Image (cartoon, grey):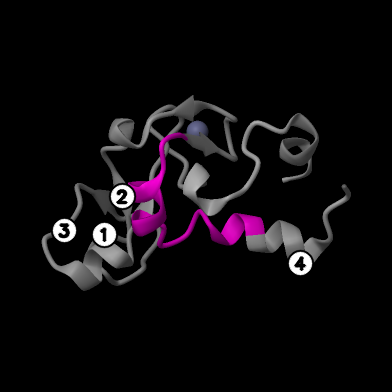
Amino acid sequence: MKLTLEQTLEVRSHARQNHAEIFRSNACRCINCSGRFAPEDIVDWVGSAGDGIPGRRGALPKKRADIAAASAVCPLCGSWEVIGDASGLPLNDAEFWKQI
Ligand SMILES: [Zn+2]
C-alpha cells in the first residue's frame, strides 16, 4: 500500500506527545535510525517541561499534564521520532517502514 502525504504525517504524529501510547506499547521503533527497543529502554523525553520546546530533554516530569506533553527520545540515536506498537501501526512491515 502506498501511503499518501497525509498518512505519512499521521504516522509521524505518533512520535509527538506520545507518552501514553509508548506506555501502552510492548515494542518501539525509531523512524530516524529504524532501531527497535522496549519502552523501558526510553529514559529521555523531549518537551518534558510541558512547554513543547523541542530539544529540551530529560527525565519525565512529575505533573500529569507535563507527562502527557512529553515525546520519547530514541535511546539509540537521540532522535525524538519514536513510535510504539500501541499506535496500531505495522512497525515490522518493511514496505510500510520504507515509506515513512
Ligand atoms: Zn533512533
Q: What residue span does the magenta drawing correspond to?
A: 11-27
Residue wearing tag 3:
61
Residues under labels 4 and 2: Cα distance? 26 Å
Relative vertical location of residue 49 with respect to residue 97 in this rendering, above or below: below
Q: Secondary structure at mark 2?
A: strand
Residue wearing tag 1:
48
Q: Earlier in the sequence, mark 4 or mark 2?
A: 4
Q: Is residue 84 visible?
A: no
Residue at the location (65% across, 63% down)? Answer: 10
Label 3 is placed on what type of residue? Pro
Relative vertical location of residue 68 with respect to residue 18 in this rendering, above or below: below
Say which mark, if any, is on residue 45: 2
Residue at the location (41% across, 54% down)? Answer: 21
Label 4 is placed on what type of residue? Glu
Q: Residue furthest right?
A: 2
Q: Earlier in the sequence, mark 1 or mark 4?
A: 4
Say which mark, if any, is on residue 6: 4
